[in-house]
Amino acid sequence: MANHKSALKRNRQNEKRNERNKTRRSQIKNAVKGVLLEVEEKSVEGAQNSLKEASKIISKNAGNGVIHKRAASRKVSGLARKVYQLSTSA
């Protein structure tokens, strides 16, 4: 445990940030699940719309430092690839 004033403050800040980031990470997971469900249902229009929303959420949270920018890019790219494959097969 921290003993001096600045370290105690740093712990308090980290706890607050961790709580905030936890909700944002679950937002990302829910957005990704939404896209994957649309792809599974073979709904091209719905998948494209949910991809647009998901990429917006992922990019916004990457900008806030919740996840790394390259990790965000990988997530969006993977989802876009799945939606593209769905649209070309339909």
Image (tube, rainbow, N blue to C red):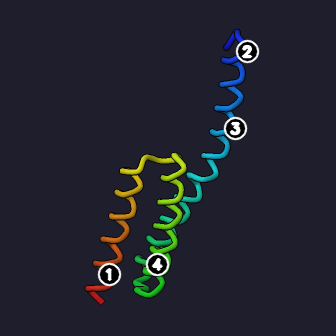
Residue depicted at x 66% and y 25%: 10
The CA distance from mark 1 to mark 3 is 40 Å
Specify few, some or many for label 1: CA neighbours under 10 Å numbering under 14, 14-19, or 20 or more.
some
Up/down of 8 relative to 50, above or below = above
Marks 3 & 4, CB-CB < 8 Å contact: no
Q: Mark 1 is on which residue type?
A: Leu
In this orientation, which residue lies closer to the viewer: 75 or 41? 75
- Looking at the rendered structure, the kind of residue marked 2 is Lys
Look at mark 2 in the image and give the residue it sits on: 5
Tag in front: 2 or 4: 2
Residue 10 located left or right of residue 51: right
Quarter of the image for residue 2 reads: top right
At numbered mark 3, what does the secondary structure look like: helix, strand or loop? helix
Q: Measure how far apart labels 3 and 2 are at the Cα level.
A: 17 Å
Helix, strand or loop status at disc 1: helix
Q: Under tag 2, what secondary structure?
A: helix
Q: Position of residue 58 (x, y in %)?
A: 49, 60
Q: Residues within 10 Å of mark 2 (few under 14, many from 20)?
A: few
Residue at left offset 48%, top offset 84%: 46
| Disc 3 target residue | 16
Q: Which mark is residue 86?
A: 1
Question: How far apart in space, not on screen, are marks 3 and 4 (Cα)?
Answer: 34 Å
Residue 18 screen position, x and y as percent: 63, 39
Q: Amino acid at mark 3?
A: Lys
Mark 3: give few (<14), some (14-19) or many (20+) Cα within 10 Å: few
Q: Is residue 14 placed above or below 64 in the rendered structure?
A: above
Identified by mark 4, the residue type is Glu
Image spot of residue 74 (x, y percent)? 34, 57
